[in-house]
Amino acid sequence: MTISRRRFLSQTTALGAAASLMPWTRALATKSPSARMKLGLVTYLWGKDWDLPTIIRNCAATKVLGVELRTQHKHGVEPSLNMDQRHEVRKRFEDSPVTLIGYGSNAQFHEKDPAKVKQNIELTKAYIKLMYDCGGTGVKVKPNGLPRDVPKEKTIQQIGHALNEVAAFGADYGQRIRLEVHGRDSQRLPVIKAIMDVATHPNVGVCWNCNDTDLEKPGLEYNFRLVRDRFGDTIHVREMNLGDYPYPKLFQLLVGTDYTDWILLECRTHPKDLVAAMKEQRKVFQELVARAEAASK
């Protein structure tokens, strides 16, 4: 059942001016980017085996103060939770310095079978209600490829229309839809731009994902600017001091375009001491932002 406008506004007070959910690009604030960009964690590999109290404790200890909870992990935050359990999740975050950013779902809208697309739309709606009850602000969804025996343009249209449907539903619950740049072929930025040209609802934004395809010709800056005006409020990064991805350049682009939201660690390595690794990534994050700010002056 759709919630009333009054109830929606009362439940999204914490979003402040963002309660209207747009524009995704925000007006310049008085603080520097280093004071406004925030570092959080996706419980992808780092945190997948932690229960909810451990996630909150370790994030607080490392000052990685936001969490995107991924589906099917040990914390057990799933649509099967009853209302009391959902309110317990909400209270755990409210009683801590850690923000529940939202949900990292596997809902995907590229499927060839229309029945599967519909199932994923309904699953996303269930996640939206879950995050509404638990105190989150959004749900991450994705394409996971482009079926090779279906015209690309047809799949792009299909994904865009599905995003419009779940974005409209999410707006009634104060929950943003975050489209992860993901999937074989579908993660290429021209494809994401084409999807977003169809997904015109203001409650859906792009979750940049730091893929190697970001660097395809004509290069990172060109591909970044293809979708920058449709960014949402989350970006996924890997270990920012490993590999060949040009994180210094990315942070220069973020600072230069006044990105002020969450940078989320979706790390791929398996360190023995995850808390120490999170502290290290926070230091790297601070250094990258400081260098980008200095370069912009």
Image (cartoon, rainbow, N blue to C red):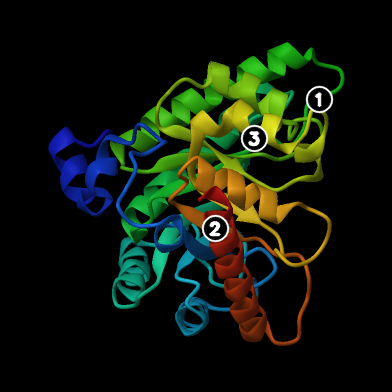
Q: Which mark is residue 147?
A: 1
At label 3, counting other C-alpha atoms closer than 10 Å, the crowd grade (few under 14, some 14-19, many 20 or more) is: some
Residue at horizontal 38 percent and vertical 28 percent from the top: 168
On the image, the x and y values in percent for residue 3 come to 23, 37
Residue placed furthest toward the left: 6
Does 59 sit above or below residue 72?
Answer: below
Q: Quarter of the image containing the N terminus?
A: top left
Q: CA distance from mark 3 to mark 2?
A: 21 Å
Sequence order check, earlier mark of 1 and 3: 1
Residue bearing the label numbered 3: 224
| Element marked by disc 1 | loop
**Residue type at the position of mark 3:** Phe
Q: Would you say 18 lies left or right of 115 here?
A: left
- Comparing 134 with 210, the one in front is 210
Q: CA distance from mark 1 to mark 3?
A: 25 Å
| Element marked by disc 3 | helix
Q: Nearer the viewer, mark 1 or mark 3?
A: 3
Residue bearing the label numbered 2: 294
Residue at horizontal 59 percent and vertical 61 percent from the top: 291
Sequence order check, earlier mark of 3 and 2: 3
- Comparing 152 with 275, the one in front is 275
Question: From this viewpoint, is residue 70 visible?
Answer: no
**Residue type at the position of mark 1:** Pro
